[in-house]
Image: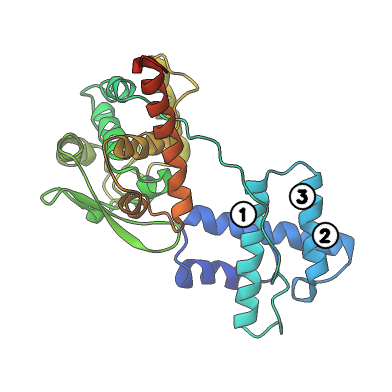
Amino acid sequence: MHEYSEGFLTYLDKQRNMSQNSIIAYNRDVSEFSNYLAEKTGAGLKDASNTDIVAYLFKLRNSGKSAATINRKTASLRTFYGYLLELKRIGANPTANIKSPKVTRKAPDYLTIEEVDTLLSLPGDSVKGVRDKAMLELLYATGVRVSEVIEANLGDVNLRMGFITCTGEFGKARIIPMGKPAREAMDKYISESRPKLIKPGASENHALFVNYMGERITRQGLWKLLKEYARQAGMDGKITPQTLRNSFAVHMIQNGADLKSLQELLGHEDISATQIYLSATKNRIKDVYDKTHPRA
């Protein structure tokens, strides 16, 4: 932890409305830079210069950090020094004019519709199975992030109207529709299984998805159950929560969704993050062309 941790954490939560995972990552990034400064120059965070930050990012690159990781750490430092500037602890932001490295985006991994159907058919009718079915259906039906699923509360779901409200990484609330299978799975879970999982006096009795202890399900818990269903489906190592989010996006585009609407559904701040899903569609069109055109 660094000397400004307490105030910075509050700033990220209350003013930037970031998710807990992002808050932890941003604060950790600043702490690592603080340790670097102390070891390299003995300077404190508020005394860092543009040259110090450039040297730190150069060190990260030489140590083998990916462009995406360096971009995240650069964003963390930009946000932190913007915070100090607001507090008037510094006269200028030392991250000004520092460019982030260009990230080469690879095509997203996604499942076919048949693979999704296989995966979603696996959970049984036990209390856990009904919960898992609802969770998997929700992930694929809405494309929400894993953090949004585990942070969701019961009041965020409107089954009568068929939507869930999510507050994403940048604090912008969005309303995402749910299809009939997801609504039915969620209704069964909320009315039948969830009451059996909630324990009297549980601290998380407002959480949407809970574990056997009646507490909010964790990221690790969700990953563990998804890994088990992937093993049962013969797709071990191929499926993550992000794979279901990717599958949602790719299948939407394949069926005619426009990029702007998809951007809003996914909660992307920048449409360039949404455009990556076009590559998967282009590859599919090329495959169809190669297989069907007589002069391909």
Secondary structure beneath disc 3?
helix
Residue farthest toward the right in the current orientation of the protein? 41
How far apart are the alpha carbons under marks 1 and 2?
16 Å
* Residue 169 image point, x, y percent: 45, 57
Q: Residue at x 36, y 21 (%)?
A: 288
Q: Residue at x 41, y 43 (%)?
A: 146
Q: Amino acid at mark 2?
A: Ala
> Would you say 176 lies left or right of 171 here?
left
Instruction: Identify residue for label 1.
Output: 72
Secondary structure beneath disc 2?
helix
Q: Residue at x 44, y 29 (%)?
A: 283
Instruction: Identify residue for label 2.
Output: 55
* Residue 271 image point, x, y percent: 44, 54
Can residue 8 be seen in this snapshot?
A: yes
Comparing 288 with 200, the one in front is 288
Measured along the vertical axis of the image, is residue 171 above or below residue 7?
A: above
Measured along the vertical axis of the image, is residue 183 above or below residue 71?
A: above
> Would you say 76 lies left or right of 217 here?
right
Q: Amino acid at mark 1?
A: Arg
Disc on res. 60:
3
* Residue 147 image point, x, y percent: 42, 47
Q: Residue at x 14, y 37 (%)?
A: 180
